[in-house]
Image (tube, rainbow, N blue to C red):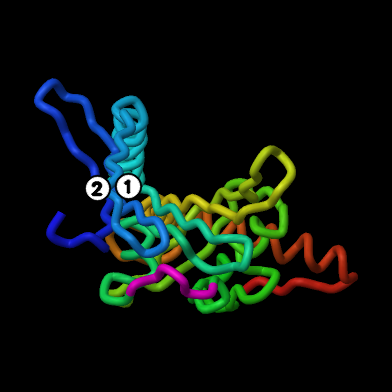
Amino acid sequence: YNNRTEMSTDEVELKDGRILYRHTYPVRNYGKYLGRVWYFLDITSQKKAQLKIEKQQVFQRAIIENVNDGIIACNSEGKINLMNCAARELYSFTTKDPIGVDIGEMNQFARDGVTPLMGENNPIQRALSGETISNEEIVVTGEEGRLHTLRVNGQAMLHDSTEKIGGVISLHDITDIIEAKKLLQFMAYHDSLTGLPNRRLFHDLLLQNLKQAARNNQKVGVL
């Protein structure tokens, strides 16, 4: 009442647990101060619903952030709006905030680890375009310089089954599996003591050369 021009809005929590929205403003008539209105609205149910949604969002973010697989999502404009901890480590975004970065700036390569995946070949760009990506392999370079082979799955994100709101991909690191396969293959075709190629590798290479020579009408010499 000492500040007759004052207008304010806040929320008041009562001892019984109810939450009220409170708004107050002065009433005037031709510039003359007549009094003040206090408006109260019980918003307990709305606040409880809002708190429930917020808790659910926190829980969902915690799940996404703590899964071992990388998850990257972009909006309809191709800007990253979600990248969990695993994905940030794979793409070396541990010191730089990836949110808002254009997906075209992501460094990734084809399965050979050499051919860059840019433009329409970018997995998340393909997902954003509406393509379904299933168990494809790409290679990225981690912060420590190690090459990581990733199995990628992805698709577009739709609202009400019609409006495209972005794209999302999941990344599963299969580097250890690939290295184990290479080791098993090496052990199958090389002597364990000397590391030299064994008879199985000789026969396989000979068979390949014979088949190639037959296709090209050539001869094979064996020394």
- Expressed as whole percent of the image width and height from the top left, the position of residue 139 reads 48, 67
Residue drawn at 40 percent across, 53 percent down? 70
- Expressed as whole percent of the image width and height from the top left, the position of residue 214 reads 85, 63
**Residue, far right:** 217
Can you identify the residue that label 2 sits on? Answer: 10
Q: Amino acid at mark 2?
A: Asp
Q: In the drawing, does residue 111 fall left or right of residue 127?
A: left
Q: In the drawing, does residue 164 fall left or right of residue 147?
A: right
Q: Which numbered mark, 2 or 1, is in the foreground of this view?
A: 2
Instruction: Please tell me how crowded label 1 is: few (under 14), some (14-19), or many (20+) other residues with Cα within 10 Å.
Output: some
The image quadrant where one finds the C terminus is: bottom right
Residue drawn at 49 percent across, 50 percent down? 170
Residue drawn at 32 percent across, 76 percent down? 96
- Expressed as whole percent of the image width and height from the top left, the position of residue 69 reads 38, 48
Image vertical order of residue 42 relative to residue 171, above or below: above
- Expressed as whole percent of the image width and height from the top left, the position of residue 7 reads 28, 57
Can you identify the residue that label 1 sits on? Answer: 68
Helix, strand or loop at disc 1?
loop
Q: In the drawing, does residue 129 fall left or right of residue 124?
A: right
Q: How many numbered marks appear?
A: 2
Image vertical order of residue 64 relative to residue 49, above or below: below
* Snapshot quadrant of residue 211: bottom right
Q: Which residues are magenta?
A: 97-102
Q: Main secondary structure of the magenta part?
A: loop
Q: Amino acid at mark 1?
A: Asn
Image vertical order of residue 33 relative to residue 91, above or below: above
Residue drawn at 36 percent across, 31 percent down? 46
Q: Is residue 188 magenta?
A: no
Helix, strand or loop at disc 2?
strand
From where the camera sits, is residue 194 visible? yes
Q: In the drawing, does residue 163 fall left or right of residue 17?
A: right
Q: CA distance from mark 2 to mark 1?
A: 43 Å
